Image: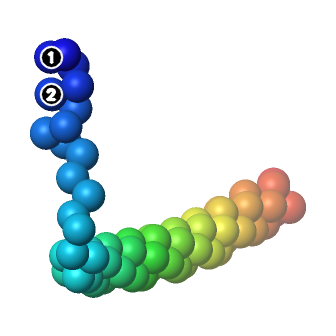
Amino acid sequence: MLESYIMSLFLYFPQDKTEYIPAAISFTIFFILCVLTFRFIIRVSNRQAAKAKELEDQIMNEINSSEKNS
């Protein structure tokens, strides 16, 4: 009995379905923001990976040139 009362506090299904509209709008906005943030993070990560690769290539070239001079 107590469990059903507690669960009924969290479950609410309105008869007027227009009450779902603000929730749908806010969900859509946050979903779009999440997708944009995810894409931004991936783009920044790819840039950082490219810079790391360039730095690695530069270091390897310096190592190889110092070995050839030795």
Residue furthest to the top in view is 1
Q: Where does residue 46 sit, x and y in percent of width and height?
A: 58, 74
Q: Judge whether 38 appears above or below 4 on screen.
A: below
| Helix, strand or loop for disc 1 | helix
Which quarter of the picture shows residue 19?
A: bottom left
- Residue 38 visible from this viewpoint: yes
User: Residue at the spot x=19%, y=16% of the render?
Assistant: 1
Residue at 80 percent across and 61 percent down: it is 64
Is residue 17 placed above or below 64 in the rendered structure? below
Residue 40 lies left or right of residue 33; in this view the side is: right
Q: Is residue 65 left or right of residue 7?
A: right
Q: Which residue is mark 2?
A: 5
Q: Residues within 10 Å of mark 1 (few under 14, many from 20)?
A: few
The image shows residue 31 at horizontal and vertical percentages of 38, 74
- Find residue 2 and name its label: 1
Neighbor class of circle 2 (other Cα within 10 Å; few <14, some 14-19, many 20+) is few
Q: Quadrant of residue 54?
A: bottom right
x, y percentage for residue 37? Answer: 38, 75
Residue in the picture at 23% in, 68% down: 15
Return the residue nearer the eye: 46 or 33. Answer: 33
Report helix, strand or loop for mark 2.
Answer: helix
Between 39 and 2, the residue placed more toward the observer is 2
Q: Are marks 2 and 1 in contact (CB under 8 Å)?
A: yes
Q: Residue 9: image x %, image y %?
A: 13, 39
Tell me the amino acid under the disc marked 1.
Leu
